[in-house]
Image (tube, helix red, strand yellow):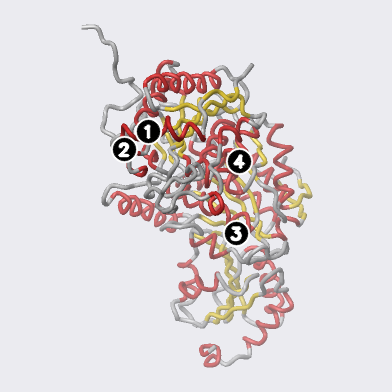
């Protein structure tokens, strides 16, 4: 029988701790596929965030480190500067990267670190119980915005990709989504490209923002959550390539 | 470099770190350690090694964490407020069992304090400083020569025990110039870094972590750390003593304060006062045994610090109530000079034992 689809080797054969309908599983697979297709498992070092994906090393079969909340881009800098031939990537959520780790990601991009950053935006803090993230959209109800995010008290959602794209040190910035198969294919291409740039020694930071569902804290079914990404999230966070090497 | 050279402490530490094989230095400007960072900015590229000025101390310690996780020798230097910011990273280094050398050129605190020399960070350095049940090795040199001599040891202890090591200097040591010799000791035999993240080529995955969620896993991890700390306490204490055996008054001090104490003790002996001193070089592990032994015969202990009393707690724990432990110190940039210390020694030498015990 012809094999038309199989688990990519870098994705471990195990159950994950993620909730039903969570987007991390898809994003993990795309990262693993990119690593295997580029044949870089033997020289890749990954950095797990603090948040739901803290156990990413249980699912991705590459050398990995777990770091303090938000500090992944600084850790990545320390790794890449001392190991320029290794492929270094961080995998961070929106609490990790867009709240507590803002300084680290801005300055890593600003310095043009040759690293790959996969930024999972699900508009909420997942692990701690669904609190507001900087990326929570206006009106969205969370544990800490029970009446919905209000711009007069909580401000507007932070558009991280647009911020990063404004920095000369970032060479590739794209916002993708895992809300349907077509978008997942585009997401895969972007993630693979973000690794390839590092492999090609293209100077600068490669950044992929992935809009990802959190059915548990959005209080939605998995299907409804995918629809919410397309109907609501993409209005605030438009998909597409913001920047690429010429 | 085997001839005598005149150099300030901050630059001396930089050169010593280069000699000790540091692969990467990450730092953020703060007084009074800026000469260190500037020296590394010049020297590290000359050696083809990594220097990076970071956006914050948080970033600096986490870059150290990253470089160290790949098996490289990495360090940072800062001063008190910056070291406070690094405590998160130091706790993670301890938890993840990563080697690192952190230099603290202490200044006055709390808060922004001032830029004068101080020993106010003793608690922070010896108690762990960050969250969790851990210790970090802390070395307290007292001369520029010692800043050099203990740098290689700091890296070796960090690698051997996979734990962060602090060199606790102060504004005087960092700024002061002294004639020194750069000499390399025979390196320790160190275990291979087979835990390092180097890409999993031809082997299974390596993971560097400090999160242990499964029931009992963190408890076991803490027992494992504790075992390591016990081994460090048993094997790595460094302590200097002078005229303790026949002394009636024993002064305990470290770092620059110990130099003032030495001068005072020598003068006291000239006055016929039986004084001696104990100088902890490693502040953790603390020379508890040495002090406890000295306290077997009745003596008055006088701890002298450039703070309002931090190490004195460890002296009391070592003495265990067998002898009176008194304290003299000045905080916030105040320096307890040899004359002032000598005055204290003189007062104690005429104090009846009973009064000493009460105080």
Quadrant of the image for the C terminus of chain B?
bottom right
Residue B176 image offset from top left, x and y in percent = 76, 57
**The one of B4 and A121 positioned closer to us in this rendering:** A121
**Mark sitting on residue A24:** 1
Q: Are marks 2 and 1 in contact (CB under 8 Å)?
A: yes
Which quadrant of the view contains residue A79? top right
**Mark sitting on residue A18:** 2
Residue B190 image offset from top left, x and y in percent = 47, 40
Relative placement, left or right, of B176 versus A123 is right
**Mark sitting on residue B140:** 3
Q: Is residue A18 above or below residue A131?
A: above
Residue B274 image offset from top left, x and y in percent = 62, 80
Q: Depth-wise, is mark 2 or mark 4 nearer the camera?
A: 2
What residue lies at 44% left-to-right and 45% top-to-bottom?
A: A140
Which quadrant of the view contains residue A29? top left
- Chain of the residue that carries numbered disc 4 in the rendered image: B
- Element carrying mark 4: loop
**Mark sitting on residue B20:** 4
């Amino acid at each position: 029988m012809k094999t038309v689809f199989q688990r990519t080797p870098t994705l471990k054969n195990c159950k994950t701790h993620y909730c039903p309908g969570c987007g991390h599983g898809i994003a993990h697979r795309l990262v693993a596929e990119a690593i295997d297709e580029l044949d870089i498992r033997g020289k890749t070092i990954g950095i797990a965030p603090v948040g739901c994906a803290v156990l990413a090393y249980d699912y991705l079969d590459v050398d990995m480190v777990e770091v303090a909340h938000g500090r992944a881009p600084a850790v990545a800098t320390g790794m890449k500067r001392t190991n320029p031939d290794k492929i270094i990537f961080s995998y961070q959520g929106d609490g990790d990267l867009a709240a507590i780790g803002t300084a680290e990601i801005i300055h890593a991009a600003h310095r043009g670190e040759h690293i790959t950053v996969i930024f999972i935006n699900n508009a909420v803090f997942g692990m701690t119980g669904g609190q507001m993230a900087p990326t929570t959209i206006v009106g969205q109800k969370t544990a800490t915005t029970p009446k919905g995010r209000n711009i007069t008290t909580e401000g507007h959602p932070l558009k991280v990709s647009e911020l990063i794209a404004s920095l000369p040190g970032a060479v590739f910035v794209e916002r993708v989504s895992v809300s349907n198969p077509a978008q997942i294919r585009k997401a895969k291409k972007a993630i693979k490209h973000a690794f390839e740039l590092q492999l090609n020694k293209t100077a600068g930071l490669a950044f992929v923002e992935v809009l990802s569902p959190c059915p548990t804290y959005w209080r939605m079914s998995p299907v409804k959550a995918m629809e919410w990404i397309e109907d609501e999230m993409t209005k605030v966070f438009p998909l597409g390539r913001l920047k690429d090497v010429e | 470099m085997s001839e005598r050279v005149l150099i300030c402490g901050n630059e001396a530490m930089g050169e010593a770190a280069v000699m000790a094989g540091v692969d990467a230095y990450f730092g953020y400007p703060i007084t009074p350690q800026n000469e260190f960072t500037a020296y590394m900015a010049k020297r590290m590229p000359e050696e083809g090694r990594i220097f990076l000025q970071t956006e914050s101390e948080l970033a600096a310690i986490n870059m150290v964490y990253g470089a160290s996780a790949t098996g490289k020798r990495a360090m940072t230097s800062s001063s008190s407020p910056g070291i406070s910011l690094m405590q998160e990273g130091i706790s993670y280094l301890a938890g993840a069992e990563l080697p690192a050398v952190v230099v603290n050129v202490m200044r006055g605190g709390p808060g922004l304090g001032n830029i004068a020399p101080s020993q106010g960070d003793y608690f922070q350095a010896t108690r762990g400083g960050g969250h969790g049940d851990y210790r970090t090795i802390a070395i307290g040199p007292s001369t520029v020569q010692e800043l050099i001599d203990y740098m290689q040891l700091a890296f070796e202890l960090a690698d051997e025990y996979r734990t962060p090591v602090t060199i606790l200097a102060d504004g005087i040591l960092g700024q002061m110039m002294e004639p020194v010799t750069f000499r390399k000791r025979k390196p320790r035999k160190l275990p291979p870094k087979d835990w390092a993240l180097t890409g999993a080529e031809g082997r299974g995955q390596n993971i560097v972590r400090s999160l242990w969620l499964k029931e009992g896993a963190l408890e076991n991890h803490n027992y494992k750390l504790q075992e390591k700390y016990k081994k460090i306490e048993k094997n790595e204490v460094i302590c200097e003593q002078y005229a303790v055996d026949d002394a009636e008054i024993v002064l305990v001090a470290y770092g620059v304060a110990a130099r003032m104490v030495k001068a005072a003790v020598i003068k006291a002996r000239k006055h016929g006062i039986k004084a001696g001193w104990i100088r902890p070089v490693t502040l953790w592990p603390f020379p508890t045994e040495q002090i406890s032994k000295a306290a077997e015969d009745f003596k008055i202990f006088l701890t002298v610090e450039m703070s309002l009393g931090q190490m004195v707690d460890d002296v009391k724990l070592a003495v265990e109530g067998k002898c009176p432990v008194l304290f003299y110190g000045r905080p916030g940039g105040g320096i307890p000079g040899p004359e002032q210390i000598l005055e204290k020694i003189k007062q104690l030498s005429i104090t009846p034992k009973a009064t000493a015990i009460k105080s």
